[in-house]
Amino acid sequence: EDQVTQSPEALRLQEGESSSLNCSYTVSGLRGLFWYRQDPGKGPEFLFTLYSAGEEKEKERLKATLTKKESFLHITAPKPEDSATYLCAVQARGSYIPTFGRGTSLIVHP
Amino acid sequence: EAGVAQSPRYKIIEKRQSVAFWCNPISGHATLYWYQQILGQGPKLLIQFQNNGVVDDSQLPKDRFSAERLKGVDSTLKIQPAKLEDSAVYLCASSFPGGGRGFRTDTQYFGPGTRLTVL
């Protein structure tokens, strides 16, 4: 059974204080790993898809990396508008079902 | 480009009542998904459609949940009868098939969701 564990559950940062969110996964053959951002009262917003170990993708202050067992979402010099819940999901080869983690709630204080 | 539309945004019902949710995907998106997101958890896929056919409904509680996507465009999800544990946000997402690399890891675009409270 595919499993996704995200840590920490919650993270409070000061504006400009860089940090990383972790997504550990167990899947029988990775088709893709996804990162989403979810603001309160809204649906998840797609950020990145990673396909293989060693792959990295960047978007503004966010950088996602992937190993064979986990993925990191690095946030560089965060701003208050980066406050949201960040969700990680994996999809196994041969499956149409993505498995989501519980998310990391990030709050960035000005 | 208009996003995924869902209605209603909020619904409060009593247990054993019926409820229906509506979703209109992004124009041209052949794949449509319904998710259930319980407070504090990640979304759980209930059913996936490709055009008007079901791709996967293995996680849909078929004794009380049903979904249809007539004409391959908009879709409805129904719960009949509702239970207390059905209280959640119901998310609809759509994607355009063809994720590259020879297999489908399509980018999913989510709607705002319908928050259901069952009393």
Image (tube, rainbow, N blue to C red):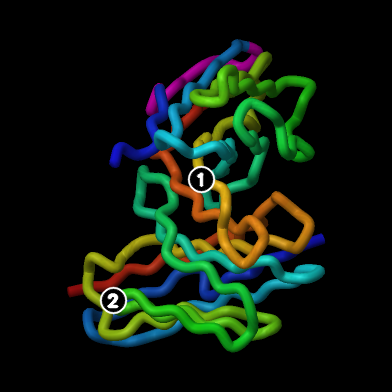
**Position of B43 compared to A93: left or right?**
left
Image quadrant occupied by the C terminus of chain A: bottom left
Amino acid type of the residue that numbered disc 1 sits on in the rendered structure: Ser
Q: Position of residue B5 (x, y in %)?
A: 38, 31
- Return the mark for residue A60: 2
The residue located at (51%, 46%) in the rendering is B96
Q: Is residue B118 visible?
A: no
- Which chain hosts label 2? A
Q: Secondary structure at mark 1?
A: strand
- The kind of secondary structure element at disc 2 is loop
The image quadrant where one finds the N terminus of chain A is bottom right
- Give the spatial CA distance, label 2 vs label 1: 24 Å
Q: Is residue B10 magenta?
A: yes
Establish if B50 lies above or below A44.
above
Q: Chain of mark 1?
A: B
Q: Is residue B12 magenta?
A: yes
Which is closer to the viewer, label 2 or label 1? 1
Visible residue check, residue B7: yes
Kindly identify which numbered label has been placed on residue B95.
1
The percent coordinates of residue A5 (x first, y second) are 64, 69
Magenta extent:
B8-16
Q: Residue at x 27, y 78 (%)?
A: A78
**Quadrant of the rendered image containing residue B80:** top right
Question: Going 51% across and 45% down the picture, which residue do you hit?
Answer: B95
